[in-house]
Image: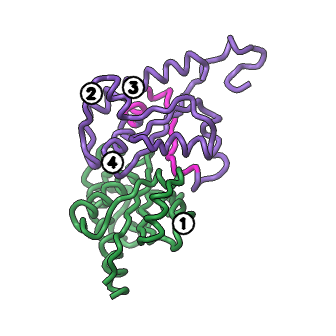
Chain colours: A purple, B green
Amino acid sequence: MKWTEEGTNMSERAAPKRIGVIACCGEDLPEGTLTRAIVRVLMEEIKPNETATICLPLFLAGDEQERTFAQTFPTLTLDGCEKQCAKIGTEKYSHAVACGLIIPDILKKLHLDMKGTKDRYDPDLARKLALEVAKRMNRLKRKGG
Amino acid sequence: MMKQTFLIIPCSGIGKAYGTICREAAYEVVEKRKPKLSRLLCLALLVKGDEEAISLLKENPAIALDGCAKRCACKNIERVAPEPPVSLTIMGLFRKHRELNPNDLNLGTVLHLEEGGKQLVDLLADEICHEMDRRRNKHE
């Protein structure tokens, strides 16, 4: 049983140490740049010891070890648009994701407007959204992945 | 004169400043230096297998920009494009510009490039433009 210590059952799942967060990084839209900033804010400020990430295109350019990422870490994907490249790509080449988030949906939930451009993300917005993603990470950890 | 649009596809490198350098060089070319001759394409679309993105690659030349030796952008394009892309890498820049020592440059971080990182953005943008001109001249 994944993420379960030997000798325990489902109700006693150990919380995973790290949650995988994969950003689409979409180069052609501001929301893609924002996904990238959010992951870095999580890794550098909010959850430096609880966040793991990988470059999405490495699933195809890398080797078998890289493709086990979403099996190794309960994984949350962060997509800039409804095409959901990060979610679909991760599930196609690695493993089912625990949670797929889309920037416009998070903005709507938080009653925020999109700010920033492709080449310049808005740091305040990135931090607000990173805090929301961190809540999802906490939930995943409590669920045991 | 060829009428195709160059598809500039930087890697999505998120672990080091080199990925950001590729990304910003792509913006420099597409938005400032050659906006009428180039456009961006999200690399993630190729990972997903997006039909529209693959069609674009079949009709237009691509330039892959990679920050590390894994060459994700180049390899993902090669999987679906009829012709291999022009492949430019940060390591290639250092090979060409021997006066630059990666250990001496203050590149900055993934989220914020410093002077050394910006210098590499300019040099990589020069390389992209040079490759575009070379290819266009060849087809004249």
Verify whether residue A57 appears in magenta: yes
Co-location on one chain, circles 4 and 1: no
| Mark 1 residue type | Glu
Q: In screen coordinates, is B2 left or right of A116?
A: right
Residue at the disc numbered 3: A46
Residue at the disc numbered 2: A112
Co-location on one chain, circles 4 and 2: yes
| CA–CA distance in space, label 2 to label 1 | 39 Å
Dot 4 crowding, Cα within 10 Å, few <14, some 14–19, many 20+: some
Give the chain letter at badge 1: B
Residue at the disc numbered 4: A29
Residue at the disc numbered 1: B78
Q: Disc 4 or 2, which lies upstream in sequence?
A: 4
Task: Quarter of the image for the C terminus of chain A: give it.
Answer: top right
Give the chain letter at badge 2: A
Image marks 3 and 2: residues in contact by CB distance under 8 Å: no
Is B54 placed above or below A58 here?
A: below
Q: Residue at x 33, y 65 (%)?
A: B124
Is B33 placed above or below A133 here?
A: below
